[in-house]
Image (spheres, rainbow, N blue to C red):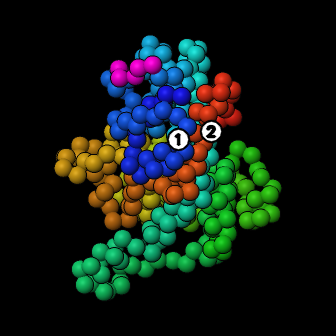
Amino acid sequence: MKVIVFNTQLYELPFLKGALHNHEVNYVEEPLSIESAANIDNTYAISISGEALDKPMLNKLVEKGVKHVALRIAGLDRIDTRYASKVGITIAHVPDYSPFAVAEHAMMLLLALNRKLLRANTKVREYDFTLNDLVGTDLHGKTAGIVGLGRTGQAMASILNGFGCRILGYNRSEKPDLTEKYQVEFCTLEKLCKESDFISLHLPYNKHTHYIINKKTIALMKKGVLLVNTARGQLVNIQDAIDEIVNEHIGGLGLDVYENEIGLFFQDHSNAILKDETFARLLSFKNVIITGHMAFLTREALSNIAQTTAFTLDCWEKGVTSKYEVKI
């Protein structure tokens, strides 16, 4: 099958080439856009990463004869799946790649915030070996809140259980097996916010989870709470979070995602002027750690993404349905 892979990153290229060897693939660095779609020619399927598929974009793909789009991500919040189905374009995604990669990254952010890791490293590099502003706390015996107990949230529960934390969980439904394995106490979001010393977000983004962390929910939290988000930027009202960092209510914020990351993350802006004042404000805080949407970035996850994409393309070439196709 002739395939165009848009938005190809150097870190994923070896994994994609190894998995997609059965297909005639054109790897393109440029993300999919109305402009770049003009170069599509006699291509039955394309693969994209985080680009939006709205009505104009889908109409352009129909015009170019594209029948299938394989996403190399899990999230569908930028995809108009209903319209895609209406115009005859099949969408598939990678629903699971490595929950351990994301959970371990979230734990890394939590540990780094708690033990002032970046500040400690900076001080040592400046030959300042004083310890007065580096006091953390034991995680053992503390209460950790996990918002969202899907596969990634469950992996986070396993890690936190290993640290000896009491774990509170907020989820659409209770999962008794998690209570048995990791002693997760399922509760309301209000209770979780009130009693947790640390909170980690592992929810998908939709209209129900939009700004689930906001001024009201933050007000319920303990003073000095550590908050980590490796899920979706739109889960957190970032201006409310900034206000509560200034008020010293939030003790530390770890982010791998950001609401306005499109056009910012995955690109080199080192020689540009940062125009996002909100992001610049976040960077000014010593108790904020930001990584550029890299929680998934392990060899295992990249291999899973490539293999899932290959499986879907193989199915389409054979004229059969992929189990990873999005159901409307």
Tag 2: amino acid: Phe
Q: Main secondary structure of the magenta part?
A: loop
Q: Which residue is mark 2?
A: 311
Tell me where residue 106 appears, x and y as whole percent.
Answer: 52, 60
Left/right of residue 8 with respect to residue 189 in the rendered view = left
Whether residue 156 sits left or right of residue 108 in the image: it is: right
Residue range in magenta is 38-42
Label 1: state its secondary structure: loop
In the picture as drawn, the residue positioned furthest to the bottom comes out as: 129
Residue in the foreground of this view, choosing between 208 and 316? 316
Question: As drawn, is 233 to the left or to the right of 184?
Answer: left
Residue depicted at 60% across the width and 59% down the height: 100
Residue 295 picture location, percent across and down: 49, 55
Q: Is residue 264 above or below residue 283?
A: above
Q: Is residue 163 magenta?
A: no
Residue on which the image places disc 1: 21
Quarter of the image with the C terminus is: top right
The residues bearing labels 2 and 1 have C-alpha atoms spaced at a distance of: 12 Å
Q: Secondary structure at mark 2?
A: helix
